[in-house]
Amino acid sequence: MKQALATVVEDICRRYGCDRTRMLDIVLAVQQRLGCVSTEAMEVIAREVNSHRVEVESVVTFYAFLSVKPQGKVVIRLCNDIVDWMRGYEAVADAMAKELGVTMGETTADGAITLTHTPCIGMSDQAPAALINEVVVPNLTPERARQVVRDLRRHLDPAQLITMVGDGNNAHPLVHSMVRNNVRRRGPVHFDSFESGNALQKTLPRTPELVIAEIRASRLRGRGGAGFATGQKWEFARNAPGDQRYVLCNADEGEPGTFKDRVLLTECPDQVFEGMTIAGYALGSNSGIVYLRGEYSYLRPFLESVLESRRQHGWLGKAIGGKPGRPQKRPDALQGDRAYHSEPLRKILRKLGIIPLLASRYTEHGSGLGKTRWVIERCLSWLHQFKRLRQRYERRSDIHDAFLSLGCALICFNVLQNSFC
């Protein structure tokens, strides 16, 4: 038995060239083939890729989709983040466990169904929610949870649990999901009228340097905590040493309460991909990668169809818009030894979605997105004010900091709410 396992794992490792950097691909393939990544399998992987078992184990135990012991044909991953707890996770988990006759983390006696919990699956707007294999089951109640288990015992096919589909592209045949977008108000940035290829056609006649200059003039910033100027980052990346560059779209979101990237991937993928293409043109990159989290794998067929459609229209591929891509090496104009020396340039999904809007309004960035710019600057201003206020106080207890942070968040929320969606 051990020899047979070793042979299977060795074959998988060799399929990926025994490349240590392909560790995730290897363990996923082992899990798919053997049902888990056991300690014995970890030992073989470590030996084949010239690593240590602890390194393999750190990968396997980090991801909720990987397991060190065999699981059932159907795996119920019940989300247990804070929002789900507030919406009744405990009662739903108890109902499922009793109906299955197992405790959390166990598999039924017949080996058919495993019940386990998992961190945020991006469904905080319709919690409690579960991921059953790749099928999302939102808005669970104890009674509905019991019915889900009864249905699964009968047919062991999570796809049959889909009795209705959500709004927008959730109803698309390639998505066919019960998830709802829950967009209460459509703002002018991501949900404005978007015509595929329009922004790209306006971009290609311009030089990459001019495109970057326009992005800088728009004053678009990163949507994270640093608020770093996008145009400046693009300029650094374009001038960094190296011939090959990659545009990485970080579509992961694991913070409890977040689901924005899920909605953008569902409703605005064409806009996001166009933003990546424009970024690639400006940076001298001919490759792009979208990080799609496992919890959103149900969107993959749909996203791949959008990419294929863009290829067929000439908006993606070797000759975009009839213009062959010839990335050129740029002089080392980077200032200092900074992180931008690395060739990949990571982009947050929301920011990439804004790029086509800016590109299609090259002469209107001062007016069309003036309110967006004002909101960002106002929020940053309030953050700075609160930072100075904190520095004036000698008492900095946890509760004091908490009240200051809460006040800052409320003010920023109020500014955003009264300005744009």
Image (spheres, grey):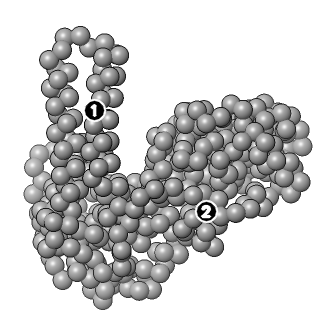
Q: Quadrant of the N terminus?
A: top right
Q: How many marks?
A: 2
- In this orientation, which residue lies closer to the viewer: 277 or 49? 277
Q: Give residue 91's quadrant in the image.
A: top right
Residue type, label 2: Gly
Q: Is residue 66 at least partly visible in the picture?
A: no
Indicate which disc residue 235 carries: none
Examine the rendered structure and indicate whether residue 219 appears above or below residue 320. above
Q: Give residue 90's quadrant in the image.
A: top right
The outermost residue toward the top is 395
* Residue at 72% from the left image edge and 60% from the top image edge: 162
The residue at which mark 1 appears reads as 408
The residue at which mark 2 appears reads as 166
**Mark 1: which secondary structure?**
helix
Residue type, label 1: Cys
* Residue at 30% from the left image edge and 89% from the top image edge: 322
The outermost residue toward the front is 418
Q: Is residue 125 at least partly visible in the picture?
A: yes
* Residue at 43% from the left image edge and 67% from the top image edge: 268
- In this orientation, which residue lies closer to the viewer: 170 or 284? 170
Q: Quadrant of the C terminus?
A: bottom left
**Mark 2: which secondary structure?**
loop
How far apart are the two marked residues, 2 and 1, measured between alpha carbons?
35 Å
How packed is label 1: few (under 14 Cα within 10 Å), some, or many (20 or more)?
Answer: some
- In this orientation, which residue lies closer to the viewer: 232 or 159? 159
* Residue at 23% from the left image edge and 46% from the top image edge: 227
